Amino acid sequence: MDFTDTPEEAAFRDEVRTWLGEHLVGEFAEIGGRGGPADETSWDARVEWERILGRDRWVGLSWPEEYGGRAANFAEQVIFNEEYAKANAPARVSFFGEQLFAPTLIAYGTEEQKRRFLPKIQSIEEFWCQGYSEPNAGSDLSNIQTRAVLDGDEWVINGQKVWTTLAHRAQWCFVITRTDPDAPAHKGISYMLVPMDQPGVTVRPLRQMTGTAEFNEVFFDDASTAKDMVLGEVNDGWKVAMATLGFERGTAFLSQQLAFQGELAELIEVAHKNSATDEATIRQRLAQAYIGVQIMKYNGMRMLTSLKKGALGPEASIGKLYWSTWHRDLGELAMDVLGPESQIVVGEPGDDYALNELQRTFMFSRSETIYAGASEIQRNIIGERVLGLPREPKIESAPKEKT
Amino acid sequence: MNFAFSDEQEQLRDAVRKFLEAKSPSAEVRRLMETTEGYDEAVWKQMAQELGLQSLHLPEAHGGQGFTFVELGIVLEEMGRVLLCAPYFSTVALAANAIMNAGSDEQQGAFLPGIAAGETIAALAFTEPNGKWDASGITMEAQGNGDSYTLDGTKMFVIDGHVANQIVVVARLSGTNGEDGISFFSVDGDASGLTRTPLATMDQTRKQARLDLSGVAATPLGDPGSGWAALSKTLDQAAVCLSNEMVGGAQKVLEMSVDYAKVRVQFGRPIGSFQAIKHKCADMLLEVESAKSAAYYASWAAAEDNEELPVVASLAKAYCSDAYFHAAAENIQIHGGIGFTWEHDAHLYFKRAKSSEILLGDATYHRELLAQRIGI
């Protein structure tokens, strides 16, 4: 047990710090690190910044060197994220491509697919979005009904996806489609790579309770993609889709802990300023939030250490359940710290509904306990796959709707 | 960065677990908890002689093995897991640490070898009938000078105070307040003027005593009057130790719940297949794993004796207290009627969880302490 850097880790940290010191200057330094992967504030400048990151191979840090990565181990990824957060560098724009799709592609893609897509993810030329949820397939994801039918050299795709973050920015979407409607739910699904810029794809923004529209609906009307744009085997896409979800629930949250720590520090400052810290219950809740965010770090470090010995399994669900609950509680605490001030939105009546950062956390965190598997689904996974509790007896499901 | 126990540490855990499974099964816990002394003399000796548990983290110069709070945490976790009835926490986690923090090298040389050898049972007497865990709770005054002091007054809630051969008493120089004037003294268990009254405890697996002192001769440990830093550190270290002990109990009740939920059938299915029960277990796992992360990290901070210790000690004590009590309470609920019986062990853990939560200050107390320590 040792939480100090090894000499190699210290050297890596130094390299990151030096690079950031040299490059994070001028307009890039002014952007600040607020906002998550779905936030579009200062988008163009952030894209420009991330292209510089990509040029110097800080995008795709963990990828194998043969695909342009640095083959960084988990400790190095943590160090990079720590230094990146400490430097208050801009929130990343390539989350879905770099953090979710790329690791899946590396695990399941053909050599040709990797060569085709990884360089453009790293150079921030192509953005990706995730085509999973549908109106009737939320928690019950295997109930997806978007159909793909092979027609000569092309798949023809029809259906609708929802909750598609940044679909309006993306050139590509990894879509799970039903390719064998007669097979059991999990068996007839394929993981397809679909270009967004085509007549058969319509992206419609979905305005959320925050007033903004980071999420979208995506409609596929005879959209197409090439026959070889399937990741893994045809009809074996469920496994691939779950691998992506594992990345989304698992390592991705590590970079969030520092951002959360920053949010709490800001809230404590607000509480000092408006004297909320005089109240015993607020003091208790702030201390509890501090305990929570520190343990998030300790949990992360324990998970990383165990990862060195093997792959992250269903334990990832513990992290997802933990951080989403913590952040939701922080949003609620923020409103109570602000008091009546929390109820006033900037601007005049009739202006755009513009939330400040704390109000946005309060609202946006309601989505975090739902996306990437709702908390209830995470508890099922923990119960069944970590603790080994029996599954619920299957109810004969209604026949799948055929399109 | 490496957040895992070494192979040697895992071997220590295995050895301690095997020993405790043999020496402290439920039947033995139940036998000892009904006695006034609350421990088995033979097992206490074996702990020292066969496994060297009492000497583990004591300095090698004074009969110890020179291990750290990380190894001590492992041992306490295993003891918490089986509700070991023995004056280990009082002797090693409270009194020995107090002697190391407050006493001179010479005094450590006088007292620690007896503890290391399993010959001395020691207690730390600092709480009083006011039930406070901070400096303001210490009202007992010491009169005297040089090496010769006398103590008068009452110490309460003294863990294993009724069986200790050596009692480390915390008092204050007369006329002082708050953190000023705090002093450590050593008092013999059979000192003249000392009346020790065993208390009937709700958690029967951890014994407490009332100590009435009337003109008791006491030897100062360290410099009288400047003991607050040593006491504060001792309490932080003890909070870390207790957090590890609680983690052991919390893990055990989680296992009891999950095992039962797999085999107990109602409505024709194991109750663990119902989300109402499954989700309870999932939440328990999340909290128990988080409690482990906090306790282990705190052990490391205590081992390093770094500046993080005060913050992480309160952090761990607050979180582990809540997590253990919640898990122990849910364990009863998941077991249903059988979990409410005297015969089932669920209540033993429930009671230990509560007594551990209260000991050294509850979660609310430590959250406030933490708030102050991080500048809220």
Image (cartoon, grey):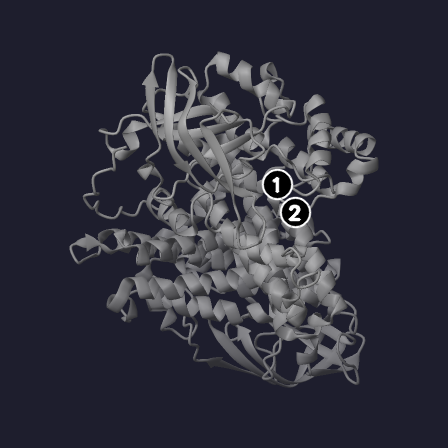
Residue at screen point 49% across, 58% down: B245
Location of residue B72 in the rendering, given as x and y in whole percent from the top left corner: 55, 52
* In-image side of A122 versus B163 (left or right): right
**In this image, B13 relative to A292: left or right?**
left
Residue drawn at (46%, 24%) of the image: A194
Residue at the image point whose x is 41% and y is 56% from the top: B284
* Residue ID at (46%, 70%): B354
Picture disc at residue A255: 1
Q: Is residue B232 above or below residue A29?
A: below
> Residues at badges 2 and 1 in contact (C-beta under 8 Å)?
yes
Please name whichever residue, A124 or A375, is drawn nearer the observer in this view of the structure.
A124
Q: Is residue A44 left or right of residue A161?
A: right
- Residue B326, compared with residue A318, is above or below; it is below
Residue B101 is left or right of residue A197, and the answer is right
Mark 1 Cα shell of 10 Å, populated few (<14), some (14-19), many (≥20): some
Return the chain for callout 2.
A
Query: Given the image, on which type of amino acid does mark 1 rest?
Result: Ser
Residue on which disc 2 sits: A259
Query: Under tag 2, what secondary structure?
Result: helix
Q: Quadrant of residue B127?
A: bottom right
Q: Secondary structure at mark 1?
A: helix
Q: Chain of mark 1?
A: A
Residue A182 visible somewhere in the drawing: yes
The CA span between labels 2 and 1 is 7 Å
Residue A82: image location, x then y, percent: 68, 40
Task: Name the residue type under label 2.
Answer: Ala
